[in-house]
Image (cartoon, rainbow, N blue to C red):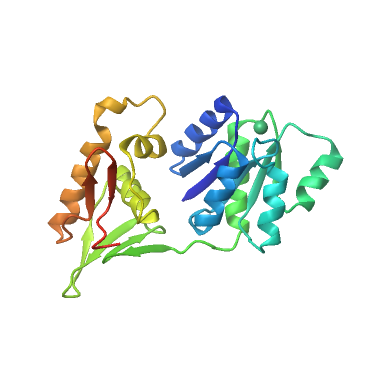
Amino acid sequence: MRILLIEDELDLGTAIKWALKQEKYIVDWAMDGTTGWNYLESQWLQYRVVILDWLLPGMMGIELCRRLRAQQNPLPVLMLTAKDRVADKITGLDAGADDYLVKPFEMEELLARLRALQRRSPDLQTQQLELGGILLNYTNRTVHYQTEQGEIRPVLLTHKEFQLLEYFMSHPHQIMPAEQILYQLWDAGTDVASNVVAAQIRLLRRKLAEQGCCDFIETIPSMGYRINPHYA
Ligand code: CA
């Protein structure tokens, strides 16, 4: 389950991202409104909920929310703000936010509100990603590979390998630097020099290859990794 977090405060953003990752969410974090909007424009279907700060550099959260709704986009929005006057809440809800959380708040409350929003929201996200014969199912968290002969084989992945594969399949044409993968999928403070990304990609490749899916992820020297264009 992927969440878009748009929050410019480093400490709060880090805390939220950490809490969400403990709950097995995958988090894309944008630190200004313009970047957040770019994420939404290019891949909003990847997200289940947006956590959106009101006061942001680039584009204000309220403006972003209005734009989203002007496009008839139904993605649930949880607005974060220090504003707690009734009039502000009404403004936020009128702009199309689905729920509203006043800073400071307890992480437990944020998580509870997220669960509620997911329950209420229609299932926007496709339940499956499919690319080059790989079928990744969000609902039961399984991965299968369909060979060229049509045989469907299960690929048994660990939680981290699943997240990694999902991350690649969600960005099929992008070259991902190891630092970016580390930032998105590992806890803050994980040592870049630890080669944890390279090691995890090696394991994932091996498991895919065992089922006949060879070279799904390729290495672009001194740039990063991407899905082999042959599959994408
Ligand atoms: Ca802010």
Q: In this view, does 88 lie to the left or right of 45?
A: right
**Residue at the spot x=37%, y=58% of the render?**
140
Q: Is residue 207 above or below residue 56?
A: below
Q: Nearer the viewer, residue 7 or 224?
A: 224
Which residue is most to the right? Answer: 87
> Closer to the camera, 58 or 151?
58
- Image: 78 above or below 57: below
Question: Could you tell me residue 116's position as x and y percent?
Answer: 62, 50
Question: In the picture shown, does residue 92 fall above or below 149?
Answer: above
Give the quarter of the image for residue 61: top right
Q: Where is residue 131 in the image (x, y as percent from the top left)?
A: 31, 64
Closer to the camera in the image, 99 or 41: 41
Q: In which quarter of the image is ligand 1?
A: top right
Q: Residue at x 26, y 59 (%)?
A: 229
Image quarter where the C terminus lies is bottom left
Left or right placement of residue 85 versus residue 133 in this view: right
From the viewer's perspective, is 81 left or right of 44? Answer: right
